Amino acid sequence: MKAVINIYLKEGVLDPQGKATHHALGSLGFNGVSDVRIGKQIVLQLDAKGKTEAEEKVREMTETLLANTVIEDYTIEIL
Amino acid sequence: MKAVINIYLKEGVLDPQGKATHHALGSLGFNGVSDVRIGKQIVLQLDAKGKTEAEEKVREMTETLLANTVIEDYTIEIL
């Protein structure tokens, strides 16, 4: 079973990597961009008996290790 | 207009960050995970007249700056 976890900084948390990318896009002549946010996408292959079990497992992994829930939000998708 | 770009390493390219995460999950007792790959998700806010123009712009940005197309693949979604 495949799980896709998107982890991104919460609204209001400064994103220096996004800011730098935004600035670089401007320097290269790409105008009209008003915001850039950069997050992580983690793709897991895991064994599970069903979607519900897979999602539960992945949520626990994300809360424990993958995301820093103080400053990050996440979404989980089981495929 | 909002654009979501997922950038991930091509098949066969070593992903040390994914390997380390896989190992860490194992150490924490999360078994049954057979693969972990870590990519980037970039969310852009941009001005464009339509979806087609937005996608064209974003593709150019991605090819020029955001992705390293030698080792990375990407997908673009315009919302």
Image (cartoon, coloured by chain):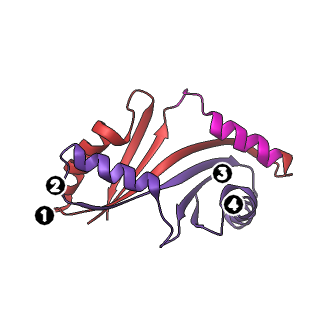
Chain colours: A red, B purple
Lateral position of residue B65 relative to residue B43, left or right: right
Q: Are marks 4 and 2 on the same chain?
A: no
Label 1 neighbour load within 10 Å: few <14, some 14-19, many 20+ = few
For label 3, the SS is loop
User: Start and end of the magenta stretch?
Assistant: A11-26
Which label number is shown at residue B1? 3
Image quadrant holding the N terminus of chain A, namely bottom left
Q: Nearer the viewer, mark 2 or mark 3?
A: 2
Chain letter behind tag 1: A
Label 2 neighbour load within 10 Å: few <14, some 14-19, many 20+ = few
* Distance CA(mark 4)–CA(mark 2): 36 Å
Lateral position of residue B14 relative to residue B29, left or right: right
Q: Which residue lies furthest to the bottom in this view?
A: B12
Q: Where is residue A30 in the image (x, y as percent from the top left)?
A: 82, 52
Chain letter behind tag 3: B
As shown in the figure, which amino acid type bears the numbered disc 3?
Met
Chain letter behind tag 4: B
Point out the tag, 3 or 4, that comes first from the N-terminus.
Answer: 3
For label 2, the SS is helix
Which residue is the site of mark 2? A53
Which label number is shown at residue A49? 1
For label 4, the SS is helix
Task: Determine if the magenta segment contains residue A73.
Answer: no
Which residue is the site of mark 4? B62
| Callout 1 touching callout 3 (CB < 8 Å) | no
* Distance CA(mark 3)–CA(mark 4): 16 Å
